Image (cartoon, grey):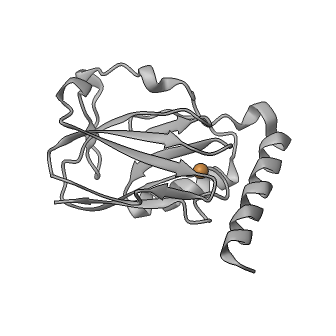
Amino acid sequence: MPFATKNLLVVIATVGALSATSLSFAHGDETHSARKFDASKVEATAFGQEGDPKKATRTITVDMADTMRFSPADITVKRGEIVKIVPRNKGQVLHEMVLGTPAELKKHAEQMKKNPGMEHDEAYMAHVKPGQSGEIVWQFTQAGEFQFACLLPGHFEAGMVGKVTVK
Ligand SMILES: [Cu+2]
């Protein structure tokens, strides 16, 4: 089957799954772009920590499409730099951006598959409705290769994953 057709089928299957689970589907609060930064609540992770929006030195816009792709799918940041990542949903279905290590994202995707109704909202993720934008303010404190992914059922499996290189 041609690649484009396969992606289209994934979209159709996903839309079907959405209507079947209706309200229970919500993966966290989708309108959390007004998240308040609280320095006392910042938790260090293997891939960095939440950044103070006032100290962000750069905005990186990443488009999300129903072809299950991020664009750009490859970003480079400097270690210690605080960046504002703005995921823009250009599609017709819900997408999300979740930062993490490749191992953590894979594990998280497995959990999402087993429990599609799970709700959570963390500083390293943004759930973005069609036509809207989200925001993740992040400080990558470790050098290395990390990822951002859409963990909605079927999306991660269809390749909705990008790479962050921290130098
Ligand atoms: Cu998605």
Look at the image and tell me in which quarter the C terminus lies.
bottom left
Return the residue found at the far bottom: 1
Q: Position of residue 165 (x, y in %)?
A: 26, 61
Left or right: residue 161 versus residue 99 is right
From the viewer's side, name the closer residue of 49 and 54.
54
Look at the image and tell me in which quarter the N terminus lies.
bottom right
Q: Position of residue 125 (x, y in %)?
A: 45, 40
From the viewer's side, name the closer residue of 127 and 24.
127
The residue drawn where x is 54% and y is 32% is 132
From the viewer's side, name the closer residue of 25 and 73.
73
The residue drawn where x is 17% and y is 28% is 55
Q: Position of residue 166 (x, y in %)?
A: 21, 58
User: How many labels were placed on the picture?
Assistant: 0
The residue drawn where x is 77% and y is 43% is 18
Work out whether 88 lies above or below 166. above
Left or right: residue 73 versus residue 129 is left
Image-quadrant location for residue 130: top right
Q: Position of residue 33 (x, y in %)?
A: 45, 25
The residue drawn where x is 72% and y is 70% is 6
Work out whether 108 lies above or below 131. below
Image-quadrant location for residue 96: top right
